[in-house]
Amino acid sequence: MQLDALNLTLTAVFEPAPEGGYTCRLEELPDVFSQGETLEEARANLADALNLVLEYHRDEARGRVVDGAVREPLHLVAS
C-alpha cells in the first residue's frame, strides 16, 4: 500500500508535553502515536508512525493467509 496514494482524512491530536514539544496521536487509530519538538516535527513523526503501523499489520496478516485465499487491492471511495 502506498500511503501517499491513499486519500483519507484522519484526526490528529497534538498536545503540549510538560517537558516541551508535543505528543500526538490519531483519534481513529489508537495504535498510532508519536511526539516531536515542534508541531511540524510531530506531524512528520505521526505520519511515519502511521506508515510503520500499517506495514506491521500488513506483514502480520500476510503470515496468516490460508492457501487458496484471494488477495486483491480494495479501493475505497468516499461517498
Image (cartoon, helix red, strand yellow):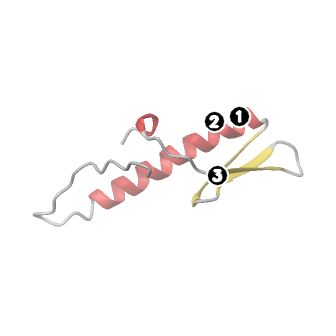
Residue in the picture at 63% in, 36% down = 44
- In this view, the mark in front (3 or 2): 3
Q: Which mark is residue 41?
A: 1
Disc 1 marks a residue whose amino acid type is Glu
- Residue 37, compared with residue 72, is above or below; it is above
Disc 2 marks a residue whose amino acid type is Ala
SS assignment at label 1: helix
Residue in the picture at 66% in, 53% down = 25
What residue occupies the far left of the structure in this picture? 68
Q: Within the image, what quadrant is residue 5 found in? A: top left
Q: Position of residue 4 (x, y in %)?
A: 45, 34
- In this view, the mark in front (1 or 3): 3
Disc 3 marks a residue whose amino acid type is Thr
SS assignment at label 2: helix
Q: Circle 3 is placed at which residue position?
A: 11
Q: Circle 2 is placed at which residue position?
A: 44
Between disc 3 and disc 2, whose residue precedes?
A: 3
Mark 3 Cα-neighbour bin, 10 Å: few <14, some 14–19, many ≥20? few
Q: Is residue 55 left or right of residue 50?
A: left
Residue in the picture at 27% in, 57% down = 62
Q: Are marks 1 and 2 in contact (CB under 8 Å)?
A: yes
Viewer-side residue, 41 vs 74 = 74
Q: Position of residue 6 (x, y in %)?
A: 43, 41
